[in-house]
Image (cartoon, grey):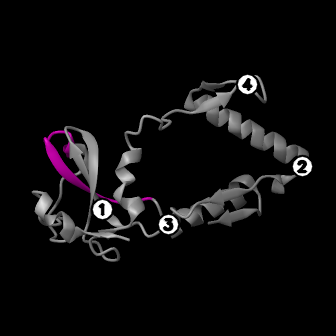
Amino acid sequence: MSVNKDFFELHRDFNYDLQSRGTPSVGWDQAGRLPETLVPTHCAFCGCQCGMFLRVTNGQVTGVEPRNFVHNRGSLCPKGIVAYQQVNHPDRLTYPMIRRGGKGGKLERASWDEALEYVAQRWQATQERYGKDAVAVYSGSSMTNEKCYLMGKFARVGLGTRHIDYN
């Protein structure tokens, strides 16, 4: 199932794709200055990275519309259509949490520095005790080829592990 861009034509004021026409479009930095605008971007739910517009109203993401991009041709899958909902979802974590007091302990808010230090120490301790290959890296399907390459490089060079899996 997909929704084609033509479906939206009667329901919006933006009847063209500024990116496709070669005209500079409004960027995210300017989106908050206008009452409503479309910001060109790409869907991050899979490696296809379909072209899409985020509808921004008074500085808040309020919707998404398909963009006439090379491979999605103005269509979005069901995941892409609801992609904008994760941005302002009330259950979305926007900060790290650390479980204090071991198993069964409460999750508490932590600073980014504290969380990264915690993870790095745990990785190092695990590798010192069980060897470099005691840790593994898993990359999701939303990553582009370039991001997968960097993740593999991080695993092999940064962590020294050979256990890498890509979805």
Give the Cα separation between the discs numbered 1 and 3. 16 Å
Residue at the spot of label 2? 130
- Nearer-N-terminus badge (3/4): 4
* Image quadrant assignment for residue 123: top right
Q: Which residue is rendered at x = 65% and y = 63% of the image?
A: 152
Left or right of residue 2: residue 39: left
Give the Cα separation between the discs numbered 2 and 4. 26 Å
Q: Which residues are magenta?
A: 30-44
Residue at the spot of label 1? 52
Answer yes or no: is residue 43 visible. Answer: no
Q: Which residue is rendered at x = 64% and y = 66% of the image?
A: 166
Please tell me how crowded label 3 is: few (under 14), some (14-19), or many (20+) other residues with Cα within 10 Å: some
Please tell me how crowded label 4 is: few (under 14), some (14-19), or many (20+) other residues with Cα within 10 Å: few
* Amino acid at pointer 4: Gly
- Nearer-N-terminus badge (1/4): 1
Q: Secondary structure at mark 4?
A: loop
